């Protein structure tokens, strides 16, 4: 996948706004060398349409891509997140390292096709099906890194520490045995994960204590002291039952406990944070951490609605992730977030905190929050930033008359995936005319894996 040295776009979204006739010079290390508005085409590769920065998918469980569409059936008892989780446990019991690599490969290609140029892999499938360690404790991390290398997506790898089945050190269930680790084993996993991503351009290593229900306070303290220099991601307050269980265990709600007991700050990302009181929302926003919102998955699982209106009013930062990967679309994540607030409050343009385009404000916030949460040098078309670029195609009817912020409104609220013509990640041209350059091979490999899993 060769790199060009210069690109030229009819228009581009730069840090200080829209510009016309923009030349973008690419450096050999995958960063942007120069950005020049009102530039002649010269010898650059020239493209119609609008160039915008690539978004970061800050929360993904890659293996769950293979479950998409397979859990939309009601059983004899009421369905919920917790019944879905049991189905997920049964599904993953059969996955091999080869399977995981194939599933992640397809997913990462689809993410690029959807406008995501980096992914935060919240990686918790570590062990063999019987719960035993692989000879290489980082075997599954190696496969995630291989999928990232094959597709070219930027990777922030977040190995998960999973210790208990619920608050108070309740033993894990049989369905969780593929996730489990102790602190010594996790140290070996982190060493192997660092080796696995060593040769991936721009790759970042962080940690993911799974949740307060799955990690004891003592272990959480150790993890933050030992690895807290990189990104720290944790599930928090996704479900009302989780909140009730945390209250019964500690007398505090999950976010209350976390803020009182850990140094939550800009390097942290609280995944979901759905069920917060207004005081918690304000206190969390004040830390400078990022809320990792996954609106499509949260809708699919019936989690509830994050109070994004009041969170933004308090100065909060957010990014979006695809989580269970039931649908792969950057536009759908941002659109679903906005629509959830409209439905709850019976309003419109709910997350536009100033007059003007809602699409522009959603994209700008997600770009900044996603890059921060993944510890990545990106989120803007500017010199020194990673050359992560998405071209919106003027051939789509919803973009036929677009200009300025209309490009973003048309993409998010109408055209969706069909708006995306080309994508570069780290300066490499990976998506052409809406398709990843290795799509056919990745799809065929995925089909074989899925057929074997469902046989």
Image (cartoon, rainbow, N blue to C red):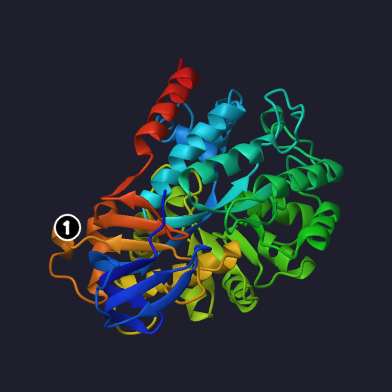
Q: Which one is in front, 211 or 438?
A: 438
Residue 139 image offset from top left, x and y in percent: 68, 34
Residue in view at x 54 percent, y 61 percent: 292
In this picture, is 193 found above or below 45? above
Number of residues whose C-alpha sits closer than 10 Å to that of mark 1, classed few (under 14), some (14–19) or many (20 or more): some
Q: What residue lies at 32% left-to-right and 74% top-to-bottom?
A: 23
Residue 432, image x, y percentages? 30, 50
Q: Position of residue 47 (x, y in %)?
A: 24, 64
In the image, is 258 to the left or to the right of 286? Answer: right
Residue 17 vertical position relative to residue 339 in the rendered view, above or below: below
Q: Is residue 104 left or right of residue 438?
A: right
Against 145, residue 403 (above or below) is below
Task: Give the image quarter of residue 268.
Answer: bottom right
Q: Between 440 and 261, which is closer to the camera in this rendering?
A: 440
The residue indicated by pointer 1 is: 396
The part of the image, by quadrant, that contains residue 188 is top right
Residue 350 in sight: no
Frontmost residue, 385 versus 222:
385
Q: Residue at x 41, y 52 (%)?
A: 2
Residue 395 placement, left or right of 172: left
Residue 333 image position (x, y, % from top left):
40, 57
- The residue at the far top in this view is 455
Element type at mark 1: loop
Residue 120 seen: yes
Q: Nearer the viewer, residue 238 or 277?
A: 238
């Amino acid at each position: 996948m060769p790199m060009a040295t210069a690109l030229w776009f009819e228009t581009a979204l730069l840090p200080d706004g829209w510009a016309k006739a923009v030349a973008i010079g690419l450096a050999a290390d995958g960063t942007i060398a120069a950005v020049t508005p009102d530039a002649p085409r010269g010898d650059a590769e020239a493209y119609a349409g609008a160039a915008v920065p690539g978004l970061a998918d800050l929360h993904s469980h890659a293996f769950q891509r293979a479950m998409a569409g397979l859990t939309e059936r009601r059983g004899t008892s009421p369905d919920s997140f917790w019944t879905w989780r049991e189905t997920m446990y049964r599904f993953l019991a059969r996955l091999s390292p080869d399977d995981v690599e194939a599933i992640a490969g397809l997913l990462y290609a689809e993410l690029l096709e959807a406008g995501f140029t980096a992914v935060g892999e919240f990686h918790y499938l570590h062990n063999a099906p019987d719960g035993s360690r692989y000879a290489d404790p980082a075997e599954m991390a190696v496969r995630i890194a291989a999928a990232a290398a094959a597709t070219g997506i930027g990777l922030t790898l977040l190995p998960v520490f999973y210790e208990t089945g619920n608050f108070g050190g309740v033993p894990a269930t049989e369905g969780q045995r593929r996730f489990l680790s102790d602190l010594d084993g996790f140290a070996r996993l982190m060493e192997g994960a660092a080796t696995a991503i060593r040769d991936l351009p721009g790759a970042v290593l962080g940690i993911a204590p799974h949740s307060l229900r799955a990690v004891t306070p003592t272990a959480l303290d150790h993890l933050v002291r030992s690895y807290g220099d990189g990104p720290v991601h944790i599930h928090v307050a996704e479900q009302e039952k989780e909140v009730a269980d945390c209250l019964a265990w500690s007398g505090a709600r999950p976010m209350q406990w976390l803020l009182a007991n850990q140094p939550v700050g800009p390097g942290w990302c609280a995944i979901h944070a759905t069920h917060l009181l207004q005081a918690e929302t304000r206190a969390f926003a004040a830390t400078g951490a990022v809320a990792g919102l996954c609106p499509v998955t949260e809708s699919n699982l019936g989690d509830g609605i994050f109070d994004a209106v009041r969170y933004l009013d308090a100065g909060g930062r957010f990014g979006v992730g695809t989580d269970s990967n039931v649908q792969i679309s950057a536009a759908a994540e941002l659109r679903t977030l906005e629509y959830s607030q409209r439905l709850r409050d019976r309003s419109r343009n709910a997350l536009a905190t100033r007059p003007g385009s809602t699409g522009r404000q959603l994209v700008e916030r997600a770009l900044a929050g996603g890059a921060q949460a993944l510890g990545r040098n990106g989120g803007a078309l500017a010199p020194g930033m990673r050359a992560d670029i998405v071209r919106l195609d003027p051939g789509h009817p919803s973009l036929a008359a677009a200009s300025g912020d209309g490009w973003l409104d048309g993409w998010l609220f109408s055209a969706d995936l069909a708006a995306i013509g080309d994508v570069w990640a780290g300066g490499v041209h990976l998506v052409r005319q809406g398709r990843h350059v290795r799509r056919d091979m990745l799809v065929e490999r995925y089909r074989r894996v899925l057929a074997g899993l469902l046989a």
